[in-house]
Amino acid sequence: MSSTAVVPSAPGPGPGPSGGPGGGTEVIQVTNVSPSASSEQMRTLFGFLGKIDELRLFPPDDSPLPVSSRVCFVKFHDPDSAVVAQHLTNTVFVDRALIVVPYAEGVIPDETKALSLLAPANAVAGLLPGGGLLPTPNPLTQIGAVPLAALGAPALDPALAALGLPGTNLNSQSLAADQLLKLMSTVDPKLN
């Protein structure tokens, strides 16, 4: 009869700060969710990947507000399930291709913060700690303190400018060579 000793294994790359391998998160953010999808349907879809500790769909199922898109947060018991869930990105569910990303904060946000993530520019805001909103650029109407119209460039159509689009006549051929040189010299005085 031989006796064997149990030797503990050497410490290796173990769970990260949030308990997952490499410090991942157990929470995923799912955007581009169809307005007709229910919490129960989302639970069924993601339940195939692992045990769900918490699932919240915003706006909620009983919301009286009309919505064009919804956002869902799923907290899995096992962080590996959150990693696998990301592979459902571009899966068409009901009538929309889902976008699934890890949610960096690791906890499901409150309704106000969740609804702020519904804007198209913020579809992947969950990847950023704090989920920060991205700024929307304004159309270029001047260079420095010089308005483009003063340099001979066509003015922006206010209706198009409100959409962030240039005027219909703003192209490289609408400026004469001397106007273009004048424009460039205001940007860089060395171009005289």
Image (cartoon, rainbow, N blue to C red):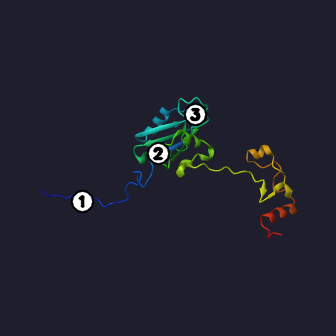
Mark 3 lies on residue: 35
In terms of secondary structure, where does tag 1 sit? loop
**Residue 132 showing in the rendered view:** yes
Figure check: 192 above or below 107: below
**Label 3 CA crowd tier, 10 Å (few <14, some 14–19, many 20+):** some
The CA distance from mark 2 to mark 1 is 37 Å
* 28 relative position to 178: left or right: left
Q: Nearer the viewer, residue 114 or 166?
A: 114
The reply to whether discs 2 and 3 touch (Cβ–Cβ < 8 Å) is no
* 136 relative position to 98: left or right: right
**Residue 98 showing in the rendered view:** no
Mark 1 lies on residue: 7
x then y, percent, for residue 109: 50, 43
For image coordinates 52% across by 52% down, the residue present is 129
x then y, percent, for residue 150: 85, 56
- The amino acid at mark 3 is Pro
For image coordinates 49% across by 33% down, the residue present is 39
**Label 1 CA crowd tier, 10 Å (few <14, some 14–19, many 20+):** few
Mark 2 lies on residue: 107
x then y, percent, for residue 182: 84, 63
- The amino acid at mark 1 is Val
In terms of secondary structure, where does tag 2 sit? loop
Q: Nearer the viewer, residue 40 or 61?
A: 61
Q: Quadrant of the N terminus?
A: bottom left
Q: Quadrant of the C terminus?
A: bottom right
x then y, percent, for residue 76: 43, 43
